[in-house]
Amino acid sequence: MNDNYVAPNGAAYALKIATPSPEVLQRRLKSGIYNYDIDQLQKRCSKCRDHWPADSEFFFAEKCSADGLSEWYKACYKDWRYPKGRKAAVDASAPLPSAPAVAHDSATQ
Ligand SMILES: [Zn+2]
């Protein structure tokens, strides 16, 4: 079965395959965004320009896009969203250290 994939966190998702219209498919095969590797449609990530299988294991499902998948490969999106890793992003949301105390008026008199 190839209808599901399991994310690293163990959650299972129904696999979504790219669903370009015939026109979009032909145009993208011609422009190099798509290619076929052993019958598997591959999609080029518009960020790193590498080709990855055109399904939701590698690209985010995106209803409004021409083929139902995001432009960027998941790992590229993750690198962009969390350049220092996800943990760093979480740490960054922690409360900032309190600002240095402003000299009180009485201290300058
Ligand atoms: Zn990429």
Image: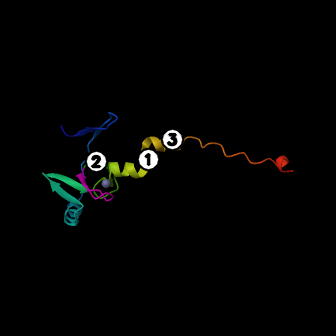
**Dot 2, crowdedness within 10 Å: few (<14), some or many (≥20)?**
many
Residue at mark 2: 58
**Number of numbered markers:** 3
Kind of residue indicated by mark 2: Phe
Label 1, label 2: how many angstroms apart (C-alpha)? 21 Å
Q: Looking at the image, is mark 1 or mark 3 earlier in the sequence? A: 1
Any part of residue 55 in sight: yes
Mark 3 residue element: helix
**Residue contact at pointers 1 and 2, CB within 8 angstroms:** no
User: Going by the picture, which residue comes out furthest to the top?
Assistant: 10
Image position, residue 39 (x, y; %): 13, 52
Residue at mark 1: 84
Residue found at x 24% / y 52%: 52
Q: Nearer the viewer, mark 1 or mark 2?
A: 1
Image position, residue 31 (x, y; %): 22, 66
Pick the front one: 50 or 15: 50
Q: Quadrant of the N terminus?
A: top left
| 2 to the left or right of 47 | left
Residue at mark 3: 91
